[in-house]
Structure formats: C-alpha cells, structure tokens
C-alpha cells in the first residue's frame, strides 16, 4: 500500500469491548485516517473461546464421541448468544443467524471427519485443524472470522462504515512447499489487496487475527 494505515488490535480480555468498538475507530474515521481493525475471538473473564476450541480439537484427536464434541461446540455457540444479548442493545437476530451458520459449518466438518476417521487424521500438532478429503478446516479460524463479522455489524450500526475482510483461501495450496519468506510475501500481497478493495469503498477493514 502506498499510504500509511493505522492498525488497531483489540485483545478482548472482557466482552464489554464489544460496545466500545465504534468509539475505538471513531477518531481516525472523522479525520479520514485510513485504518484497519484486527480482532481476536470473543471471550470473557471466565470463558476463553480459543481455549474451548483447542479443547474440541483435543477431543477430536483423542477420538472422543461426536456427541461430546458437539456439546462443547454448543457451549461456545451459546456463550456468544448470551454475550450478544447481554452487551448489545440492538436487534441481534441477524448476528445470531450468522453465529448459528458458523456453528453448523464447523459441526458438519467435524461430523464428516468422524464418519471417515479411519482414513482422515488431524493435521500438524500446533495448527488445530482437521483434514477431510476435500479441505483443511481450521477450528480456531472459524471463531476469529465470526468475531470480525460481529465487529463489522456493530461498527456499521453506529454509522461508521466497516467491512469484514473475507480471508478464506488466502493461504495458497502450495504453502507447505514455500519457504517462510516466500509464504509471507504471498500472504502479505493477497491480504493487502483485499484490504485495499475495502478501503476504496471508504470502509474500515475488519480482519480476523489468526492469519494477519
């Protein structure tokens, strides 16, 4: 990018940060400073979404029952429902529909793995993904992507134009064949291109943290 970009990363130690989102971007917005927002998965002081997702991956790796895994995933979904109802004084039906869509997509991928577990195994020890015959599913990524979408909705509802940057398939298929510097270069160019498209529309890009 030829111009500088103000980037904000929010840690979300407390889910109350949800209601602060518009205020965190307003000052740069009114001064026409180009900015991007990068967010983590939603959590509270006593519920860490990322830790819960890692627990799900460990259940899958240990070949626990599908029902046990589904219950853990439902716990995460219901936590998001409760947080949004508690923190946001807006109509949350659209957000809940999206959360449920994400839940169903991840549940389907996990179910597919269970049905074919004799020949399908989780991938590398440290990336918390599961492999199927058709795709690699990052369990962590799903809920960071959800967090970015939630932020887009909240910021936009407060009259500041924001847009969730979809980073699906941003990692090239030959990523494991590339050297670290080469992969970084490919990812940087692709992410920058997607962010620039949002900036051209005079909107604030909101990105999930897991890749950027």
Image (spheres, rainbow, N blue to C red):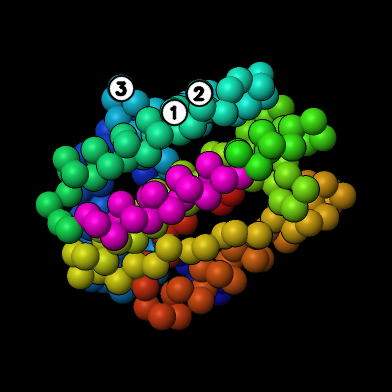
Residue carrying label 1: 71
| In this rendering, the label closer to the viewer, 3 or 2 | 2
The residue segment tinted magenta is 92-109
| Place of residue 135 in the rendered image (x, y in percent of width and height, measured from the top left) | 71, 51
Determine whether the residue tagged by mark 3 lies in a helix, strand or loop.
Answer: loop
Residue 69 among those drawn in magenta: no
Residue extending furthest toward the left: 89
Residue carrying label 3: 46
Determine whether the residue tagged by mark 1 lies in a helix, strand or loop.
Answer: helix
Between 128 and 74, the residue placed more toward the observer is 74
| Place of residue 114 in the rendered image (x, y in percent of width and height, measured from the top left) | 66, 33
| In this rendering, the label closer to the viewer, 3 or 1 | 1
Residue 87 visible in the picture: yes
Residue carrying label 2: 68
Task: Determine the CA span between mark 3 and mark 2.
Answer: 21 Å
| Place of residue 68 in the rendered image (x, y in percent of width and height, measured from the top left) | 50, 23
Q: Are discs 1 and 2 less than 8 Å apart at CB?
A: yes
- Quarter-of-image position of residue 170: bottom right
| Place of residue 66 in the rendered image (x, y in percent of width and height, measured from the top left) | 57, 28
């Amino acid at each position: 990018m030829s111009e500088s970009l103000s980037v904000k990363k929010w840690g979300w130690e407390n889910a109350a940060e949800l209601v602060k989102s518009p205020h965190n971007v307003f000052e740069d917005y009114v001064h026409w400073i180009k900015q991007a927002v990068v967010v983590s998965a939603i959590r509270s002081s006593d519920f860490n979404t990322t830790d819960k997702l890692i627990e799900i991956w460990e259940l899958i790796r240990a070949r626990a029952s599908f029902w046990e895994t589904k219950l853990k995933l439902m716990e995460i979904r219901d936590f998001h429902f409760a947080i949004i109802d508690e923190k946001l004084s807006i109509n949350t039906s659209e957000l809940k529909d999206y959360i449920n869509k994400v839940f169903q997509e991840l549940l389907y991928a996990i179910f597919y793995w269970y049905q074919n577990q004799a020949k399908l195994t989780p991938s590398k020890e440290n990336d918390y993904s599961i492999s199927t015959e058709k795709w690699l599913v990052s369990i962590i990524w799903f809920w960071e992507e959800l967090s970015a979408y939630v932020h887009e909705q909240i910021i936009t509802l407060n009259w500041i134009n924001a847009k969730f940057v979809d980073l699906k398939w941003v990692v090239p298929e030959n990523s494991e064949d590339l050297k670290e510097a080469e992969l970084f270069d490919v990812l940087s160019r692709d992410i920058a291109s997607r962010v620039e498209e949002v900036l051209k529309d005079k909107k604030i890009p909101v990105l999930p943290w897991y890749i950027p």
